[in-house]
Amino acid sequence: MVRMTDLNPELATFLADFTSPEVPGSPWTTPSPPAMRRVALVSSAGLRLRGDEAFSEGSADYRSIPLGRTADVVQDHVSVSHDRIGFQEDVNVVFPLQRLVELAEDGVIGSLADTHYSFMGATDPLSMESAARHLAGRMKAEGVNTVVLAPV
């Protein structure tokens, strides 16, 4: 994670003044006990499987990453302030799926979804709404009741 003081001054000013969009309604619900949760991981690191269509700048869609395929994950995230060294050393830095596997194996959480997802974080969130709604329906159909968001 980069510090604001390490950024290009123009980018630091832009980020300091950035206003997140208002989302109507309340996303909060009373969660089920951890042992009853089916968990999916969603990252904004611009991850995809080697051979899948690459993310382009401003991509508002997502890529699917099946459980057990993290060795095949590559990163398309583009930003002057994004350091890929952590990802290159351990994918769990940006996509902590192995940690979730361990929690499931230890019985802390009920189960993991068969598929996990990544968006391109360097994208206007409003342009991602349609894809995010589609993905929410897809996860709901798989019985996912808990999503871990890994922002990058």
Image: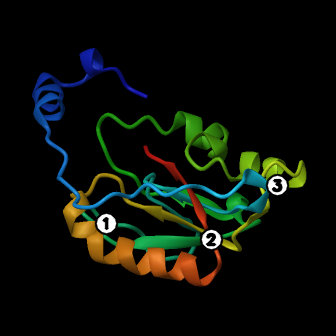
Front-most of 133 and 43?
Answer: 133
In whole angstroms, how far apart are the C-alphas of marks 3 and 1? 34 Å
> What amino acid does circle 2 point to?
Val
Q: Residue at left 72%, top 66%? A: 69
Of discs 3 and 1, which sits in the foreground?
3
Image quadrant where residue 142 sits: bottom right
Classify mark 2: helix, strand or loop.
loop
Classify mark 3: helix, strand or loop.
helix
Classify mark 1: helix, strand or loop.
loop
The disc placed on residue 144 is 2
The disc placed on residue 56 is 1
Q: Which residue is mark 3?
A: 104
Front-most of 54 and 133?
Answer: 133
> What amino acid does circle 3 point to?
Ala
In whole angstroms, how far apart are the C-alphas of marks 3 and 2? 14 Å
Residue 16: give x, y in percent of width and height.
16, 28
